[in-house]
Image (cartoon, coloured by chain):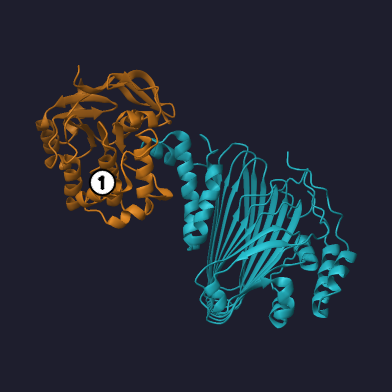
Chain colours: A cyan, B orange
Amino acid sequence: MATNIERAPDVDRAAIEQLVKSEPDWLGDLRRAAFTRYEELPQPDATTPGWRRLSLEGIDLRAPRPAPTVFTTQVSAADRERGLVVCSLADAARSHEGDVRQALSIEHKGKSVGRYAAIAEAAWQDGVFVYAPAHFVAQEPVRIELSSGTYPRVMVLAGEGAQLTVAETHREQDPVSAGVVDLLCGGGAVVRYLHVQDCARTAAAFSHQRAMLERDARLITLNFGIGGRFARTDVEVELRGPGAESDMLGLVFAEDRQQFDYRTLQGHRSPNTRSDLLFKAALDDQSHASYTGVIVIDRGAQRSDAYQANRNLLLKEGARADTEPMLEIEADDVRCTHGATVGPVDEEQLFYARSRGLEADAAARLIVEGFFAEVFEKFGNPAVTDSLRSAVAPHLGRVGAV
Amino acid sequence: MADHLLHITDLHVSVAGNEIIRGLDLTVNRGSVHALMGPNGSGKSTLSLALMGHPKYTITKGDIKFKGQSIVELSPDERARLGMFLGFQYPSAVPGVSVANFLRNALMAHHKGSSPLTPAKFKQLLDNGIRKLKMDPAVLARYVNDGFSGGEKKRLEILQALVLEPDLEILDETDSGLDIDALRIIAEGIEAQRTGERAILLITHYQRILNYLKPDVVHVMVRGKIVREGGPELAAELEAKGYDPLIKELVEA
């Protein structure tokens, strides 16, 4: 049994007012508006649209009062000297007030801010602010580790032509947490963003990530989910500028009774934009993965190219996956394809590996490793993904004969 | 008897309830090359997959002895570790697993989980194989059979045999779909493995590859049974006359 953490009282307006006291007015206004949205949205249960496929029994989803945010960052000294800013977001709201205000005030067209993103926007205490000036090319990835904080907030601003990688890991113990991540990529910027969710096995972890890409910007995101009892992740990418490109990757390894719910948006708002999405889940025991992916191509986004694939590998009979693609295409000169698979490890692959001497479990492990490797390689930064391979390894040891 | 590496008696094999192999007897001697020939649909591939223990192929009667031991109850990996190797007609792709990694895992599985070679020696072994088979060295980093052409797949099967050094190599239509240059290279690759005690069971529809690789024994399979056996001259006869006279003879008998 996990240690019995005393439940914090539910969040209320007074808690928000507490935060607002020492902050600039514009931020207080944003928080209050977000709290109102939170109050308007019902706490989801098994009858809420979009939640019906999930089984929420025994999961407490009440949003608690915010606890202090605890995080560490790792940045190369050389990058800092050359102008990269990595600091507390609460501090940045003062030191980089203009940038933060602008970023927080962006109207996201496809914004589907649910209850937990709304409360995170209202109640965040702190988080990390990453700012790469125009044409800055980072030598080392920025690493962020969040170990506590009910509503952590991360903001990455990449100036025109900037290039950087941010690797964020959540190892929160809190029973309920909800984070918001904003990624703003200026014209021609190239940003890699890795989000690792490795929270306590008793926790419900929400993450709402949204990105805005200007002309010719490129964003590669990888969501890696291995922790939590229940994890809901929303990734929304807005290709606002012409020629913007997005690669969205996802990888889940689930076991026991873990549930992962992924929602993605590929929003094509300008011509010649490209998006490619590959979300994969390997599901052991009684685990469950749910994927809902929306591709939107606006009328003006001609010659756009959108691709979406969701692959689910069921390692045990009790594991379950469902997948739902949704297309809203208003332009006529576009390419858009999507595909989904749900099934056990391929019997022919297994036989092939076994015919080379590998025992059934070793063969299955190798195939699952391969299933993952494709995604790690697509991310294109082994410096941050190699450690994920070793994070999966002990879990793969349990993957038995299938 | 001591020379019998593989000894099949009265073998019956069914797939999804259909009997494909119907009382087959076949003996393969150590240190020799056997060609198993036959028209399409005679059950050659079924035999190869049943020998390797494919779960969809059920042995309903008869026995397969390998190195004097019955293997019908053994798993595919146990058969492999005992020294059997199947070069697949249609090998599976294993996306995300590089050729080098796959081969390292396979070699380790053959040696109780630890590599018998240092990384440098292993690399050397792969490099030699690649040179012999005139493969692109970049193949080692590619995913196993993923996006490979037919010819690349066949070469990779032979490369795996070079690394694993089996006692019995069953090559299922390794020659099909290859142009003449590729065929020659593959035949040379197989020839290079014709050493010592190793036996090769070459399953083929055509006589073509036998121009490069002289068999010691030729078996002809029709409708799930061996119907003729002979020396290399039998292959030449089939090449000249085709399978029709043989089938006709059977029908009349």
Number of residues whose C-alpha sits closer than 10 Å to that of mark 1, classed few (under 14), some (14–19) or many (20 or more): some
Residue type at mark 1 is Leu
Q: Using residue A56 as the reference point, say whether residue A164 is left or right of it.
A: left
Looking at the image, residue B175 lies above or below residue A211: above
- Label 1 resides on the chain identified as B
Identify the residue under disc 1.
B125
Query: Which residue is at the far right?
Result: A14
SS at badge 1: helix
Residue B185 in percent (x, y) is at 18, 49
Observer-nearest of A65 and A118: A65
Q: Is residue A283 left or right of residue B247?
A: right
Q: Position of residue B173 (x, y in %)?
A: 26, 40
Closer to the camera in the image, B18 or B176: B176
Could you tell me which quadrant the N terminus of chain A lies in? top right
Q: Quadrant of residue B35?
A: top left
Up the image or down, B114 lies above or below A223; here it is above
At a point 89% along the width and 65% down the height, the residue shown is A13
